């Protein structure tokens, strides 16, 4: 059974940093692109970033470029999101998601339950 | 403002069919067959219903179908059931990024 379990969320002050983790199991992690998608309270979904199987390609939404870094450790079956210079508008539930097949853009076929990030003073 | 435009709400009675539209541009929906649809119940993670415009993942009911014409994609749900009441989001590749619609709340009357 495919499982994605996020951790690392919490309350952080504006300008602060946080590192999210996603532990994957039940599939061959190294054969899939992986993504982070966020959802502000009561709002819609927003794609944040994705990363290729070997980590050689990474893409980001414009609003987080230069502040967030996506990475992965295939030996540990783990996905990460380093978030720096956090702003109030980054407050959201952050979901880890697996990209279907070997593609980067076909669709996110498995999702974790999310970890909540709150940016507030 | 979301990149893709969806109606805020739709409704239907059990057994009926409904269609949710998702309007983008020639830079996203219109240029790529990489539209996906997600169902989200309150407090739950999204679930993939349709990928690559019209393909269904294994385990997804054939009551859900997707299509595309020009810059507009559509999700049709036939034989509406009470458990279909949820939020639905469309999504498209847009050139090295992904864009979502604002979401549509489906109410089953």
Image (cartoon, rainbow, N blue to C red):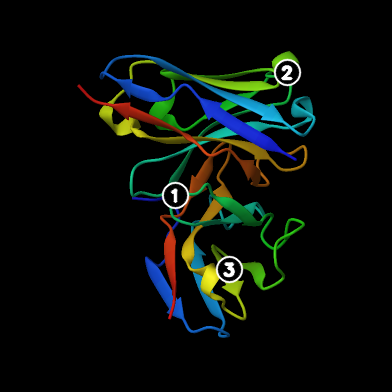
Is A40 displayed left or right of B52 in the figure? Answer: left
Q: Is residue B50 above or below residue A77?
A: below
Separation (CA) of disc 3 from disc 2: 35 Å
Which residue lies at the image location 47% right of the left edge and 33% below the top edge?
Answer: A61
- Residue at 68 percent across and 46 percent down: it is A106
At mark 2, the secondary structure is: helix
Depth-wise, is mark 3 or mark 2 nearer the camera? Answer: 2
Q: Label 1: how many residues lie within 10 Å, few (<14), some (14-19) or many (20+)?
A: few
Label annotation for residue A26: none
The residue at 58%/85% (across/down) is B15
Whether label 1 touches label 2, CB < 8 Å: no
Which is more foreground, mark 3 or mark 1? 1
Q: Which mark is residue B43?
A: 1
Residue holding disc 2? A74
Quadrant in which the C terminus of chain B appears? bottom left
Q: Which residue is mark 3?
A: B75
Residue B31 visible from this viewpoint: no
Quick one: B60 or B2, which is closer to the camera? B60
Q: Which residue appears at 54% of the width and 62% of the height?
A: B71
Instruction: Give residue B100's position: percent from left, percent from top.
Output: 48, 50
Q: CA distance from mark 1 to mark 2?
A: 30 Å
- Cα distance, mark 3 to mark 1? 22 Å
In the rendered view, tell whether residue B38 sits above or below residue A6: below
Marks 3,1: beta carbons within 8 A: no
Looking at the picture, does residue B35 appear above or below residue A74? below
Q: Is residue A4 visible?
A: yes
């Amino acid at each position: 059974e495919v499982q994605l379990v996020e951790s690392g969320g919490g309350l952080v002050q504006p300008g602060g940093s946080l590192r999210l983790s996603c532990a994957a199991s039940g599939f061959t992690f190294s054969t899939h692109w992986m993504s982070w998608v966020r959802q502000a309270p009561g709002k819609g979904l927003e794609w944040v970033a994705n990363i290729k199987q070997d980590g050689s390609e990474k893409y980001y939404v414009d609003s987080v470029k230069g502040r967030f870094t996506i990475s992965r450790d295939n030996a540990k079956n783990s996905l990460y999101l380093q978030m720096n210079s956090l702003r109030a508008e980054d407050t959201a539930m952050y979901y880890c998601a697996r990209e279907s097949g070997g593609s980067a853009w076909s669709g996110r076929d498995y999702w974790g339950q999310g970890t909540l990030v709150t940016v507030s003073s | 403002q979301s990149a893709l435009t969806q109606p805020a709400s739709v409704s239907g009675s059990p057994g009926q069919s409904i269609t949710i539209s998702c309007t983008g541009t020639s830079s996203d929906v219109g240029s790529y067959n990489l539209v996906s649809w997600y169902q989200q119940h309150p407090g739950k993670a999204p679930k993939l219903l349709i990928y690559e415009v019209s393909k269904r993942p294994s385990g997804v009911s054939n009551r859900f179908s997707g299509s595309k014409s020009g810059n507009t994609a559509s999700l049709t749900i036939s034989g509406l059931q009470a458990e279909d009441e949820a939020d639905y989001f469309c999504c498209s590749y847009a050139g090295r990024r992904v864009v979502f619609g604002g979401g549509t709340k489906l109410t089953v009357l």
